[in-house]
Amino acid sequence: MDADASKLNPALLQTEVQSFAIDSRRVRTGEVFFAFSQPEYQNNCFNGEFQDAHKYISSAFEKGAIACVARPDRFAEHRVELEKFQDRLILVKDAIAAFQKLAHGVYLEWNKPVVALTGSAGKTTAKELTAHVLTASGRKVLRNIKNYNNGLGHPLTVLNLANDKSYDVAVLEMGMSTPNKEIERLCRITPPDVAVELNVLPVHVEHLGSIENVASAKAELIENMKEGGTAVLNADDFRVLQMRGLSKGKTVTFGIEKAADVSASAIEMKRFGETEFVLNLPNGEAKVLLQLSGRHNVSNALAAAAVGYIFGMSAREIAGALRTVAPPPQRGEVLHFAEGFTVINDSYNSNPAALLGMVKTLTDGGKSAKRRIVVAGEMLELGEAEKEIHGETGEKLAKSGIDFLIGVRGLAQDLTDGAEKIGLSQTKFFDSSDEAGEFLASEIKAGDLVLVKGSRGVRTEKVVEKLLENFALEK
């Protein structure tokens, strides 16, 4: 880690480390605490202003930390407070880089397969489906919790291997939002044996400038996969399929619309929240009943099936695993209420393609609903054309077959304006998710089918929480 250990307590080098922490509030006895500060965040391409964690080193030691990793210049700044801990401080030039190097070292010692996934939408769902499929094959699977898919969350996940080397495979999503080689950096920590590309959509264009730049950033996953590994590519996305030439080994394709190695046929939506299809693999086929709605989730399931196939699973084994999967919270979670209405909670994130895709799921599967209602929060990080994009998306929503559009916060006003322009008469706009939730709770009726979707910062899950406060779920 390029650390200065000259003043360390010699006994510390013989002390067993229990784990590692980057949040002083969560430090436990026997852990090493990494204190990050603004220079590290800037050096490692994190946007925004961050607190100097050196202020919390004393607190970390009080909670039982055995050592802390810090910067020499920050130690000098806080010398009065920290000098008494000097023999337990590991001084490094860049604590985030040291944290990532440590994770890479743990990965090398573990030395088992890594499945890495990226895409503009569906990463977490595809990751969970993939981990679920591989677990069903009898393997012990390490996965990111929540969306720990960046330069801090990724190594934090990998460091779990320091205490438990019994994992057979790691399934890790990799995210990016800037043109700063974020995925390449993550691949340096854990070079993928299997690299899964889901899709390329106009997300984070504000930072990357164009969808072509987004595609280049996503392609870093394939460029940095292991020699002799396998690239898993979405045949339905031409930008993803163009990455075939970057593969350093085999390529397995998946798709619904285009010819692919792993495909779905006879797709049929049952009760909302259930999709049936035939899974076609090069070595067989099997019928799948997926407890998720929409073609986008069939695509995510195909990505997981492709990984299962690479690991030697049969179509029948994969279909059996997919039958028992449940949607992650706030990502297409279907809630059936006792009062006779159904809500799709997809509050985790949003962009135009993902919103329109979920609305297609709503309209395709909700033909028997009395009303199809969309609660759509404003979509963030769309760049200079964000106002026009919201307006155009609103126009598309009006043509999609929905009955009622509720916009939430900021630019969602342009969504509702665009929908009204095309002739959707039932629209409402609210400045906050709390207000939208109050309104929907007073308006919703038996037979309604509701989609709730918004970018993370809009907190549209509050709309769902308001419904749960007022109505009971089916038992």
Image (spheres, rainbow, N blue to C red):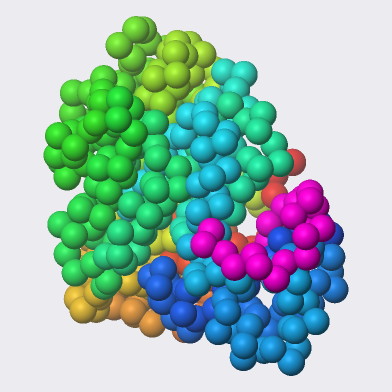
Where does residue 272 sit, x and y in percent of width and height?
A: 49, 39
Where does residue 178 sit, x and y in percent of width and height?
A: 31, 66
Where does residue 385 sit, x and y in percent of width and height?
A: 19, 76
Measuring 51% from the left and 56% from the top, which residue is drawn there? 100
Query: Of residues 419 and 54, which is closer to you in this image?
Result: 54
Residue 395 left/right relative to 345? left
Measuring 63% from the left and 78% from the top, which residue is drawn there? 53
Residue 279 left/right relative to 59? left
Residue 269 position (above or below residue 210): above
Residue 254 left/right relative to 50? left
Query: Of residues 305 and 192, which is closer to you in this image?
Result: 192
- Residue farthest toward the front in the current orientation of the protein: 6
Residue 109 makes an appearance in the image: yes
Measuring 48% from the left and 63% from the top, which residue is drawn there? 97
Question: Residue 333 in magenta?
Answer: no
Residue 301 makes an appearance in the image: no
The C terminus - image quarter? top right
Measuring 18% from the left and 28% from the top, which residue is drawn there? 258
Where residue 254 sits, quadrant-wise, is top left
- Residue farthest toward the top in the current orientation of the protein: 283
What is the span of residues highlighted in magenta in the rendered image? 1-27
